Image (spheres, helix red, strand yellow):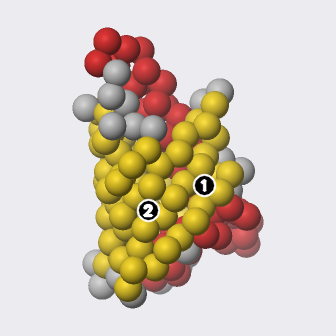
């Protein structure tokens, strides 16, 4: 089992950041790492999403259950099925000021191949961090450019 955590400061209000990240379907058009996302809403605070992303030199896919807690600015996810044995975690947003916040992606995963875990999981951790960094940079590009 491996943990991966990435935090980035973005130029957006915490609520705006939460809403952008919670709009998983928009990741297709804003994030190069994301090939496709299909979202099925269960209710206002819960959905299932199916992801296909570029992953290192290949692709990775999974279906997850998503729980949206707007009052805590947190989105929890748990893989239901997919390429990894375990992939679960959360996105959390914390306000720094009216127009700036930190976004944290925190997950744990297991690729499910114990004999290759020492080789595969560090590569997977690096790829996940790179993808999350790229997603956040692309999602918030207009805000970043507006401040620069």
Nearer to the camera, 110 or 12: 110
x and y percent of residue 94 in the render?
A: 36, 70
The relative height of residue 106 versus residue 141 in the rendered view (above or below) is above
Distance, label 1 to label 2, CA atoms, is 11 Å
Q: Residue at x 58, y 65 (%)?
A: 38
Residue labelled with disc 1 = 135
Nearer to the camera, 33 or 105: 33
Neighbor class of circle 1 (other Cα within 10 Å; few <14, some 14-19, many 20+) is many
Residue at disc 1, secondary structure: helix
Residue labelled with disc 2 = 103
Q: Is residue 93 visible in this depiction of the protein?
A: no
Residue at disc 2, secondary structure: strand
Count numbered badges in the picture. 2
Q: Residue at x 60, y 61 (%)?
A: 37
Nearer to the camera, 60 or 33: 60
x and y percent of residue 131 in the render?
A: 57, 45
């Amino acid at each position: 089992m491996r943990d991966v955590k990435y935090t980035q400061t973005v130029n957006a209000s915490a609520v705006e950041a939460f809403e952008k990240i919670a709009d998983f379907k928009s990741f297709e058009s804003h994030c190069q790492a994301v090939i496709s996302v299909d979202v099925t809403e269960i209710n206002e605070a819960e959905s299932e999403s199916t992801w296909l992303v570029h992953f290192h030199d290949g692709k990775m896919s999974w279906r997850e259950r998503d729980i949206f807690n707007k009052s805590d600015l947190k989105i929890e996810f748990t893989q239901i099925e997919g390429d990894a044995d375990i992939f679960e975690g959360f996105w959390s947003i914390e306000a720094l000021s009216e127009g700036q916040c930190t976004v944290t992606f925190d997950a744990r995963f297991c690729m499910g191949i114990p004999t290759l875990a020492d080789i595969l999981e560090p590569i997977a951790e690096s790829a996940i961090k790179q993808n999350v960094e790229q997603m956040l940079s692309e999602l918030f590009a207009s805000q970043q450019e507006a401040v620069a």
